[in-house]
């Protein structure tokens, strides 16, 4: 029996050493050793022969200490670690694996990327977390039956530009992203852009699912009393509410973020992927980002969209181009005064297709349409008209000739009675003074009467 050599053995190999030593010494039979180790008798005989020749090393696997043929080289590991700290910083292991294939031509699984990061001590924000069990809502059966709309504020350009709000629409049945659009803030323009792109590419959805933002629902709706609701009193629709109503889209109010979890999870995914893709492309402005989004959506849908339960589409065919333009726009009412309307400080007149000015009755209600390309026109009695600025002819200037003013004499005529006015003589006795004044006045009246 050869002496046992100092080698590192696993628990399984250490157990084999004890049993095989007993078999070599003859204290147990080959059949008993095979039963203990769960091996065939032929395998036990081979191990027993090796133990006699090499000792314990016969029980160690022959590839122990060798580098596997398919092992990742140190240079590639260094490159992955460098990319994870710079260009791919913040990306998940799965996203890094996709980027390595697409940009570097290196096929590496997400598990291998994760293992390299752990070896180098590089933290990854997308470590696995145990999910809280929740009962999921069943997906809509058809594409276009229910679309979720929302916006996400985030530093999408990572400091290369201002913080922006990403407006988006996602299908509940397939998780397909229909449209994305960036704006400085969550506003009507962003949602109208998303609606126009979605209806142009796919059609009109049956229903939309949104939160309770005042862009979607009027804040006065909650202020109606029960008596007012029973009386049929309603508040005016918002601009988006009016668009949904005219397109025949049912508008559903989500009472919590979890209710529209499909689009909430989309924001989490895009915050990890879209910002890195735009960083790699060197995008630093909102215009460049909006041009980049359609191509990104196409790649995203190919990778993450699922098949619906019913392959038949629920989208309704869009109306004519002119009709869609008159619906998906900002619409404001103006009252005509003298065949003109006032719109943001400027007066306009309505013009028909032949260039003729349309005469308007007083107090006619005109709807001014501002389209997404910032052009404007008007709608009156169901017809669309162009707008032209009204510039009234300037009033002619009236020049007044200078007139020499003659000085008027302020000196009274010689026969003016007031020139002959004389005060009555002073009398000490009050009674006599009264009669003297009265007689003097009567005398003056008689004298003036005679002169006339």
Image (cartoon, helix red, strand yellow):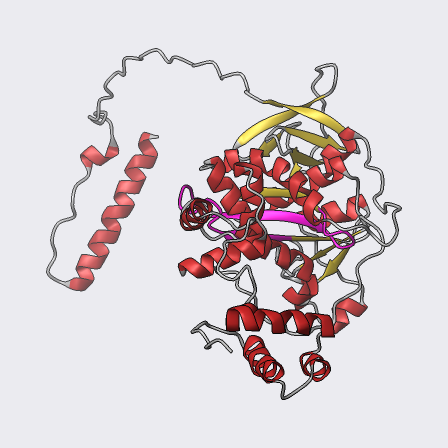
Position of 441 relative to 63 (above/below)? above
Left or right side of 309 for 22: left
Camera-nearest residue between 137 and 282: 282
Q: Is residue 89 left or right of residue 291?
A: left
Q: Which residues are magenta?
A: 150-176
On the picture, is 340 further left or further right than 116? right
Q: Quadrant of the C terminus?
A: top left
Please tell me which residue lies in front, 65 or 346. Answer: 65
Q: Position of residue 197 (x, y in %)?
A: 69, 37
Position of 61 with respect to 88 (left or right) is: right
The quadrant in which residue 87 appears is top left
Please state the horizontal and vertical placement of residue 295, each as a whole percent of the image: 63, 35
Measured along the vertical axis of the image, is residue 307 above or below residue 11? above
For image coordinates 69% across by 33% down, the residue present is 362
Can residue 40 be seen here? The reply is no
In this rendered view, identify the residue nearer to me: 258 or 276. 276
Residue 108 x %, y %: 57, 48
The reply to whether residue 268 is visible in this rendering is yes
Identify the residue shown where x is 81% and y is 37%.
318
Q: Residue furthest bottom?
A: 27
In the rendered image, the vertical position of residue 47 relative to residue 355, given as above or below: below
The percent coordinates of residue 98 (x first, y second) are: 58, 45
Q: Residue at x 84, y 51 (%)?
A: 142
Q: Residue 153 in magenta?
A: yes
Asked whether residue 156 is drawn in magenta, I would say yes
The answer to whether residue 26 is above or below residue 111 is below
């Amino acid at each position: 029996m050869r002496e046992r050599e100092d080698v590192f053995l696993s628990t399984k190999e250490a157990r084999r050493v004890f049993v095989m030593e007993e078999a070599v010494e003859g204290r147990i039979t080959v059949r008993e050793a095979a039963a203990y180790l769960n091996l065939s008798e032929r395998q036990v005989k081979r191990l027993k022969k090796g133990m006699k020749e090499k000792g314990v090393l016969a029980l160690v696997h022959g590839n122990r200490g060798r580098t596997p043929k398919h092992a990742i080289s140190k240079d590639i590991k260094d490159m992955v670690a460098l990319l994870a700290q710079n260009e791919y910083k913040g990306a998940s292991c799965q996203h890094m694996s996709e980027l390595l294939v697409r940009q570097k031509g290196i096929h590496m699984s997400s598990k291998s990327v994760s293992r390299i990061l752990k070896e180098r001590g590089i933290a990854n924000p997308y470590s696995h977390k145990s999910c809280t069990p929740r009962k999921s809502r069943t997906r809509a059966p058809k594409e276009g039956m229910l679309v979720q709309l929302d916006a996400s504020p985030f530093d999408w350009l990572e400091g290369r530009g201002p913080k922006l709000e990403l407006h988006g629409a996602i299908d509940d049945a397939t998780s397909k992203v229909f449209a994305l659009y960036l704006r400085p803030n969550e506003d009507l323009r962003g949602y109208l852009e998303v609606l126009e792109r979605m209806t142009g590419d796919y059609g009109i959805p049956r229903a939309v699912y949104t939160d309770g933002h005042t862009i979607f629902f009027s804040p006065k709706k909650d202020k109606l009393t029960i008596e007012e609701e029973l009386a049929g009193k309603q508040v005016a629709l918002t601009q988006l509410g009016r668009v949904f109503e005219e397109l025949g889209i049912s508008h559903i109010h989500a009472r919590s973020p979890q209710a529209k979890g499909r689009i909430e999870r989309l924001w989490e995914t895009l915050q990890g992927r879209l910002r890195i893709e735009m960083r790699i492309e060197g995008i630093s402005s909102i215009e460049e980002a909006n041009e980049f989004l359609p191509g990104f959506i196409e790649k995203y849908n190919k990778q993450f969209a699922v098949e619906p339960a019913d392959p038949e589409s629920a989208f309704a065919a869009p109306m004519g181009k002119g009709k869609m333009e008159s619906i998906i726009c900002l619409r404001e009412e103006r009252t005509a005064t003298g065949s003109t309307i006032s719109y943001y400080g400027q007066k306009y007149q309505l013009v028909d297709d032949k260039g003729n000015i349309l005469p308007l009755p007083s107090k006619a209600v005109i709807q001014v349409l501002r389209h997404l390309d910032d052009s404007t026109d008007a709608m009156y009695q169901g017809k669309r008209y162009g707008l032209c600025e009204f510039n009234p002819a300037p009033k002619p200037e009236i020049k007044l000739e200078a007139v020499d003013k003659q000085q008027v004499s302020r000196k009274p005529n010689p026969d003016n009675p007031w020139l002959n006015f004389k005060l009555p003589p002073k009398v000490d006795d009050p009674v006599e003074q009264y009669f003297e004044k009265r007689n003097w006045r009567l005398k003056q009246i008689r004298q003036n009467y005679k002169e006339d």
